[in-house]
């Protein structure tokens, strides 16, 4: 009698390509949770750096999955869970340990509001479908994405670590920042998405040069660079809003003419 024994395989021979993007996502979870541990040890510089690397991995895992055709439903759900932990829960804890605990129960309430808004924002994102007649909308997010929101929430801490200027009351600054960021996440504000951006070949050299300069600044002026990057992102918000409105107006103006042509044919 021959028994059919099924071998247990951690990695399927049919779909090994799913491993790499999911491994990057899990690594992001570990970084998010580790940032909380660093905050408990009052090592806030490492907390910020851990969240920064988690944001980089969040950008890479999706791109890698699409590049090697390793996208999956499991990967999508895992990515959302990672975003909630690394960019919804962890930044709130870090800011509570650093400054928000000074405003008592209100500080913890602000942390809860931020985490809930992050979860709601991700749930809405997962249900968003871009219509075929409006492909340009793929270049925009609805509301501030969670990795950017994490950076904005940590901005008071980053400002403190940059040693540009010493404020007297970081608790109030942090409270205002976390509430405004929570509102931006669940708002309908159009913000730029870099997921589908295409760089012309003749501009690649300038992109690489810019990346090199940015990395150099990060190495030598880490927190100053992060702080001004956050300010630049904030300045881009009204630009993305008016850009979206302009594109939408152009799209709507074309729609009636197409309908008229259809009516003439009929």
Image (cartoon, rainbow, N blue to C red):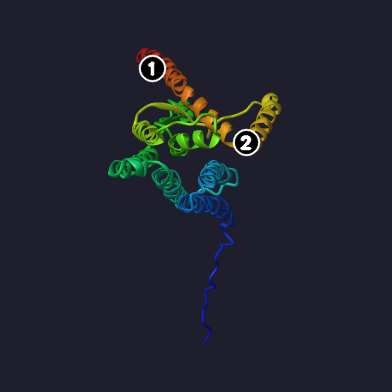
Q: Which residue is mark 1?
A: 252
Residue 97 is at least partly visible in this image: yes
Give the crowd class for mark 2: few <14, some 14-19, many >=20 residues within 10 Å: some
89 left or right of 207 in image: left
Per the rendering, the mark at residue 230 is: none
Proximity of marks 2 and 1: CB atoms separated by less than 8 Å: no
Residue 233 image offset from top left, x and y in percent? 50, 27
Q: Residue at x 35, y 40 (%)?
A: 114
Furthest residue to the front?
A: 168
Label 1 residue SS: helix
Give whichever of 158, 196 is nearer the camera.
Answer: 158
Q: Quadrant of the C terminus?
A: top left
Disc number lying in front (2 or 1): 2
Residue 72 is at least partly visible in this image: no
Give whichever of 111, 20 is nearer the camera.
Answer: 111
Query: Which of the 4 quarters of the picture holds residue 13?
Result: bottom right
Residue 50 image offset from top left, x and y in percent? 53, 47
Residue 169 image offset from top left, x and y in percent? 40, 33
Label 2 residue SS: helix
Q: Residue at x 52, y 74 (%)?
A: 6
112 left or right of 149 in image: left
Give the crowd class for mark 1: few <14, some 14-19, many >=20 residues within 10 Å: few
Q: Which residue is mark 2?
A: 218
Give whichever of 59, 198 is nearer the camera.
Answer: 59
Q: Earlier in the sequence, mark 2 or mark 1?
A: 2
Residue 175 image offset from top left, x and y in percent? 35, 35
Q: For the image shown, how many numbered marks are present on the structure?
A: 2
Q: Residue at x 67, y 34 (%)?
A: 216
Image height of 124 relative to 187, above or below: below
Q: How far apart in space, not on screen, are marks 2 and 1 (Cα)?
A: 43 Å
Give whichever of 187, 196 is nearer the camera.
Answer: 187
């Amino acid at each position: 009698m021959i028994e059919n024994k099924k071998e247990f395989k951690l990695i399927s021979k049919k779909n090994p390509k799913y491993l790499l993007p999911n491994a990057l996502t899990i690594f992001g979870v570990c970084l998010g949770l580790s940032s909380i541990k660093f905050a408990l040890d009052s090592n806030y510089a490492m907390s910020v750096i851990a969240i920064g690397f988690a944001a980089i991995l969040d950008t890479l895992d999706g791109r890698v999955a699409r590049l090697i055709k390793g996208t999956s439903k499991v990967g999508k759900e895992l990515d959302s869970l990672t975003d909630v932990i690394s960019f919804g829960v962890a930044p709130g804890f870090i800011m509570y340990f650093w400054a928000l605990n000074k405003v008592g129960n209100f500080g913890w309430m602000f942390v809860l509001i931020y985490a809930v808004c992050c979860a709601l924002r991700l749930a809405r994102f997962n249900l968003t479908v871009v219509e075929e007649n409006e492909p340009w909308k793929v270049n925009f997010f609805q509301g501030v994405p969670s990795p950017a929101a994490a950076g904005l929430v940590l901005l008071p801490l980053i400002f403190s670590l940059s040693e540009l200027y010493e404020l007297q009351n970081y608790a109030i600054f942090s409270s205002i920042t976390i509430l405004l960021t929570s509102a931006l996440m669940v708002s309908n504000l159009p913000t730029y998405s870099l997921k589908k951006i295409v760089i012309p070949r003749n501009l690649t050299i300038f992109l690489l040069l810019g990346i090199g300069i940015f990395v150099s600044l990060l190495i030598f002026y880490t927190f100053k660079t992060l702080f001004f990057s956050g300010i630049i992102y904030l300045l881009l918000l009204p630009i993305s809003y008016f850009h979206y409105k302009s594109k939408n107006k152009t799209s709507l103006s074309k729609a009636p003419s197409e309908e008229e042509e259809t009516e003439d044919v009929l």
